[in-house]
Image (cartoon, helix red, strand yellow):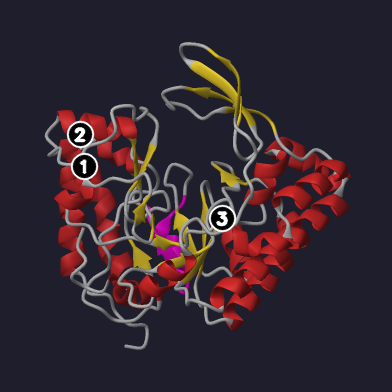
């Protein structure tokens, strides 16, 4: 990982659409099985992975939140791919619990050779394939009604808990961040006004409650918004932040999971409220992470104050060139089609053709559009990443003022 240049300074120039010599060299994430395959095909194994790393475990790169660090405390992230390609340093996340606090007690319900059913620390009941090769089967959530929410609000989202939520020593972290070389983010998944609801209620149940119990949903969102603003007020008084991140995952291949009217009623007012507050504290950039087809969502997020987005999944039909033309001020991360990596160099080259244009326009950091799956060979990934690095070094980021 390269730290001899000021990654933070470069990051802020890129997202500020300023001229600079290059964009950042980042990747978002890999499956555990992908890295294991690459080790068997020639990736130098210096630090490796824990022996019990599951096949489907998400291993973060420097451009992904899973690969971010809490100051000096690294999360579950890749080292060897990062070192091999000399990627730039990634995000720093605040070592602070902005979500459920304290956690629920984790309880195992049943277990077989291949599966485990449990209540997790977020109060969700799910059945998990032990190798993480597929999404869990979600079975139950903490909130079903007003009574459940009242209990969870008092016990897990209490406004009096703000100074108790630090993961590490607060003063040491703040001191270290004064001269940081990488961008510091406020918040962490599942902070967001749809993502938080799906974690508390479940997607299908939520769709019913939007219509059957709108007052309950408004009540939940109002409290969470006020909690996060109170947290931000405490944190921004002690340290400056480069970007706020929100997690939504509110779209599929067919588009948004909710209508524009539902978005505007439930999400827009809270986004405007929290973003206006964060702006008053000097934060200028607001990133949302959502999978799926985002064409309908982009103008809604922009209206609400969001100005950055990732990862623009290609298999959902997102067209980065058209998105850039239609929304020239939108900060964009990701968008390289992961499915080309197993098809071969011809397909990789075609996908890389759009990188020059996107990089030169500014406000763009290229990397694969989601976790890289194990069907991608080390040879193909090397070809893609070496070619992309060549493009990065040969393509200047132009200022909009030029």
As helix, strand or loop, the secondary structure at mark 2 comes to helix
On the question of residue 234 being in view, the answer is yes
> Where residue 288 sits in the image (x, y, percent)?
53, 59
User: Would you identify the image quadrant in which residue 59 lies?
Assistant: top left
Q: State the extent of the magenta-drawn residues as a range.
A: 318-335
Q: Residue at x 58, y 42 (%)?
A: 254
> Where residue 395 sits in the image (x, y, percent)?
20, 70
- Front-most of 372 and 146? 146
On the question of residue 362 being in view, the answer is no
Q: Is 333 part of what is drawn in magenta?
A: yes
Q: Which residue is mark 2?
A: 38
Q: Which residue is mark 1?
A: 381
> Where residue 65 sits in the image (x, y, percent)?
43, 53
Quote the CA–CA distance across marks 2 and 3: 34 Å
- Which callout, 1 or 2, points at the residue further toward the start of the chain? 2
Pointers 1 and 2 in contact (CB under 8 A)? yes
User: Would you identify the image quadrant in which residue 117 lies?
Assistant: top right
Q: Is 88 part of what is drawn in magenta?
A: no
Q: Is residue 33 above or below residue 238?
A: above
- Which callout, 3 or 1, points at the residue further toward the start of the chain? 3
Q: Which residue is mark 3?
A: 97
Q: Residue at x 59, y 69 (%)?
A: 302
Left or right: where 121 falls relative to 1: right
Quote the CA–CA distance across marks 1 and 2: 9 Å
* Location of the C terminus (image quadrant): bottom left
- Front-most of 399 and 182? 182
Q: Residue at x 76, y 37 (%)?
A: 205
- Which callout, 2 or 3, points at the residue further toward the start of the chain? 2
User: Would you identify the image quadrant in which residue 279 lies?
Assistant: bottom right
């Amino acid at each position: 990982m390269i730290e001899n240049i000021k990654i933070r300074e470069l990051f802020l120039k890129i997202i500020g659409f300023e001229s600079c010599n290059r964009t950042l060299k980042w990747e978002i994430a890999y499956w555990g099985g992908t890295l294991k395959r690459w080790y068997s095909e020639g990736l130098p194994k210096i630090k490796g992975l824990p022996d019990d790393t599951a096949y489907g475990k998400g291993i973060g790169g420097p451009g992904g939140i899973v690969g971010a660090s809490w100051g000096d405390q690294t999360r579950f992230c890749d080292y060897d791919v990062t070192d091999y390609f000399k990627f730039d340093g990634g995000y720093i996340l605040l070592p602070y619990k902005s979500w459920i606090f304290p956690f629920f007690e984790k309880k195992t319900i049943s277990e077989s050779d291949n599966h485990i059913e449990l209540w997790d620390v977020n109060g969700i009941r799910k059945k998990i394939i032990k190798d993480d090769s597929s999404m869990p089967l979600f079975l139950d959530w903490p909130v079903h009604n007003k009574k459940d929410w009242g209990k969870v609000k008092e016990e897990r989202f209490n406004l009096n808990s703000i100074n108790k939520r630090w993961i590490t020593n607060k003063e040491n972290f703040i001191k270290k961040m004064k001269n940081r070389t990488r961008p510091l983010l406020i918040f962490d998944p599942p902070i967001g006004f749809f993502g938080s609801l799906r974690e508390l209620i479940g997607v299908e149940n939520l769709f019913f409650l939007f219509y059957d119990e709108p007052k309950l949903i408004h009540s939940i969102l109002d409290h969470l918004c006020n909690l996060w603003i109170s947290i931000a007020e405490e944190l921004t008084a002690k340290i400056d932040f480069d970007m706020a991140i929100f997690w939504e995952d509110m779209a599929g291949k067919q588009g948004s999971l909710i209508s524009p009217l539902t978005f505007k009623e439930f999400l827009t007012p809270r986004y405007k409220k929290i973003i206006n507050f964060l702006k008053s504290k000097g934060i200028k950039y607001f990133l949302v992470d959502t999978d799926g087809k985002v064409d309908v969502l982009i103008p809604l997020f922009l209206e609400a104050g969001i100005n950055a987005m990732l990862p623009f999944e290609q298999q959902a039909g997102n067209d980065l060139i058209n998105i850039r033309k239609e929304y020239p001020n939108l900060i964009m991360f990701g968008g390289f089609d992961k499915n080309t990596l197993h098809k071969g160099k011809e397909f990789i080259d075609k996908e890389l053709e759009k990188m020059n244009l996107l990089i030169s326009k500014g406000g763009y950091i290229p990397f694969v559009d989601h976790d890289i799956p194990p069907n991608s060979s080390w040879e193909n990934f090397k070809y893609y990443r070496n070619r992309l690095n060549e493009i990065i070094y040969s393509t200047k980021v132009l200022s909009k003022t030029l």
